[in-house]
């Protein structure tokens, strides 16, 4: 914060084209820094249908808007570089956070080769919006200790590169599947074939944070048919694991013995030696 009360995010002071996470859909979930940059833009190159048009109408109606879907790097890079070099303020808007299945870096590196600097502005990834919709946590005391962001096999991943079964097999991991709405039934069939508990909870959150958001809840055994009945083929987050139900967790140490001044647990050397790094579950 500066002396006159302005937020000094550091992001808006950077040189070059910002690659901004637009968040999961709701315009209010764009960060303050992202909103400021978008409002100042002359040219907004956005990721098409996963960036809510309400956000574009609300924050950058004044700017030229270009949908990047269907454009290759050979078209996108000169478009952004030429506008930037002619003095326009250019922003690149990705859905969610650009760091997750965003293919931002290849654009940034190609722009760097043209002498155009770029930088990243994070956003709310859709797994976080989905967990808020489900009113749960992705990590949950004594239920889920880990989170995985993954995608199923298909054109990009081979069967050998699809590790969903391994992740589900850990048992204490919440598995967040991106880019897998069209393949829920096949993915679940594979999990059943590989011997996973058919009653493992699964939630599918379609368009998290959008006005037409929808939640389908089931299990590895039941969710495939439910999603097919609902007709969703894209734009949903598939979450597997006990944490999706938000139940059966244990009270955390943070708000129990430790808060009352008790000793850190013997098996938690981090808590012992670094009290400022308290577990904030
Ligand atoms: C190309 S990836 C981009 C992910 C994005 N960078 C992010 O951080 O959320 C697109 C996938 O993200 C998921 N997705 C994006 N927005 C979503 C939303 N609002 N609700 C549920 N899933 C969403 C879907 O699985 C979709 O297939």
Image (cartoon, helix red, strand yellow):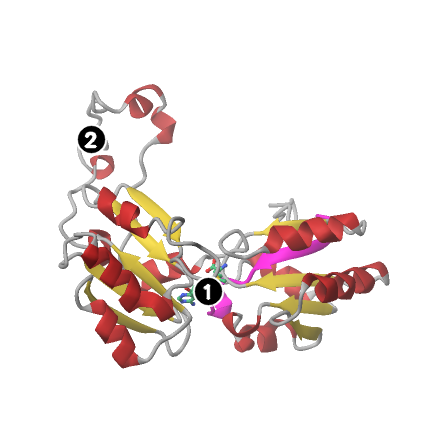
- The quarter of the picture where the C terminus appears is top left
Q: Position of residue 40 (x, y in %)?
A: 70, 65
User: Which mark is drawn over residue 209?
Assistant: none
Classify mark 1 as within 8 Å of ligand 1 or not, answering yes or no.
yes
Q: Which residues are the magenta region?
A: 12-29
Q: Position of residue 272 (x, y in %)?
A: 29, 21
Can residue 124 be seen from the camera position used here? Answer: yes
Ligand 1 - quadrant of the structure image = bottom left
Residue 96 belongs to magenta span: no
* On screen, residue 264 above or below 133: above
Residue at figure coordinates x 42%, y 70% from the top left: 235
In the rendered structure, the answer to whether residue 132 lies left or right of residue 29 reads left
Q: Position of residue 212 (x, y in %)?
A: 38, 79
Residue at figure coordinates x 25%, y 36% from the top left: 254
Q: Position of residue 100 (x, y in %)?
A: 49, 53
Say few, some or many: other residues with alpha carbon within 10 Å of mark 1 (under 14 / 14 to 19 / 20 or more).
many
Residue 25 belongs to magenta span: yes
User: Which mark is drawn over residue 24?
Assistant: 1
Q: CA distance from mark 1 to mark 2?
A: 38 Å
User: Which mark is drawn over residue 260?
Assistant: 2
- The quarter of the picture where the N terminus appears is top right
Residue at figure coordinates x 57%, y 56% from the top left: 103
């Amino acid at each position: 914060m500066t002396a006159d009360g302005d937020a000094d995010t550091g992001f808006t002071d950077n040189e070059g084209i910002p690659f901004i996470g637009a968040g999961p859909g709701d315009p209010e979930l764009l960060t303050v820094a992202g909103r400021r940059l978008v409002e100042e833009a002359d040219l907004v190159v956005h990721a098409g249908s996963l960036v809510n048009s309400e956000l574009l109408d609300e924050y950058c109606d004044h700017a030229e808007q270009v949908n990047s879907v269907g454009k290759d790097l050979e078209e996108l890079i000169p478009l952004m570089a030429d506008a930037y070099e002619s003095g326009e303020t250019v922003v690149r808007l990705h859905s969610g956070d650009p760091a997750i299945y965003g293919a931002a870096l290849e654009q940034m590196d190609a722009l760097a080769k043209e002498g155009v600097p770029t930088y990243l502005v994070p956003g709310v990834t859709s797994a976080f919006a989905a967990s808020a919709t489900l009113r749960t946590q992705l990590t949950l005391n004594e239920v889920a200790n880990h989170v995985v962001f993954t995608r199923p096999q298909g054109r990009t991943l081979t069967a050998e590169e699809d590790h969903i079964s391994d992740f589900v097999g850990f048992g204490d991991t919440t598995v967040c599947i991106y880019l897998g709405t069209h393949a829920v039934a096949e993915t679940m069939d594979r999990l059943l074939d590989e011997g996973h508990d058919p009653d493992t909870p699964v939630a599918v959150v379609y368009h998290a944070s959008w006005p037409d958001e929808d939640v389908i809840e089931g299990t590895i055994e039941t969710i495939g048919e439910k999603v097919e009945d609902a007709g969703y083929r894209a734009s949903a987050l598939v979450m597997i694991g006990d944490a999706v139900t938000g139940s059966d967790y244990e009270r955390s140490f943070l708000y129990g013995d430790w808060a009352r001044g008790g000793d850190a647990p013997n098996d938690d050397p981090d808590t012992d030696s670094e009290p400022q790094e308290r577990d904030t579950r």
